[in-house]
Amino acid sequence: MIYALDQFTDSLGEPLRDFSKGRLAAFFADPRASTWEDAHGVALNAQGLTLWQAWIALDPDAPREGRHVTIDAFDRVHVVREWEQIPDGAMLSRIVQFVLESTGRQ
């Protein structure tokens, strides 16, 4: 799946910046709630389709709400509610294929 990082574009049609590629690569390598939180909003094509939106397009059971947090008086973030689920490896492969096919890149 790492090959896909060079196929994705940002919402302007430009290659993803290293920061966005890094967020996606971290999730691909270690799929858990915290890496999903960092990657779910990355735009993957010129239409602005995000990783999370692509999952929702493929899976009617994908969560429609994300992590909920609060910030205390010392600017510390506290997770109130974690993601209900994150995409597993098989779903992630489907998401990547869907995005690449929808943009004419395979």
Image (spheres, rainbow, N blue to C red):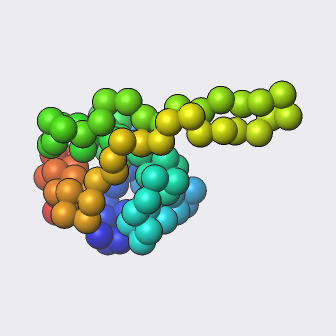
Residue under the image location 33 percent in, 47 percent down? 85
Q: Quadrant of residue 32?
A: bottom left
Left or right, 14 with respect to 46, comes to right
Quadrant of the image for the N terminus? Answer: bottom left
The outermost residue toward the right is 74
Q: Is residue 14 visible?
A: no
Q: Is residue 28 visible?
A: yes
Residue under the image location 34 percent in, 50 percent down? 86
Residue under the image location 15 percent in, 43 percent down? 58
Q: Position of residue 49 (x, y in %)?
A: 31, 38
Q: Position of residue 53 (x, y in %)?
A: 29, 37
Q: Vertical placement of 7 versus 3: above or below?
A: above
Q: Vertical placement of 94 versus 57: above or below?
A: below
Quadrant of the image for the C terminus? Answer: bottom left
Q: Nearer the viewer, residue 64 or 38?
A: 64
Q: Nearer the viewer, residue 7 or 36?
A: 36
Q: Vertical placement of 33 versus 56: above or below?
A: below
Q: Position of residue 9 (x, y in %)?
A: 37, 50
Residue under the image location 29 percent in, 53 percent down? 87
Q: Vertical placement of 18 versus 77: above or below?
A: below
Q: Position of residue 28 (x, y in %)?
A: 38, 66
| Count of labels in the image | 0
Q: Quadrant of residue 3?
A: bottom left
The outermost residue toward the front is 80
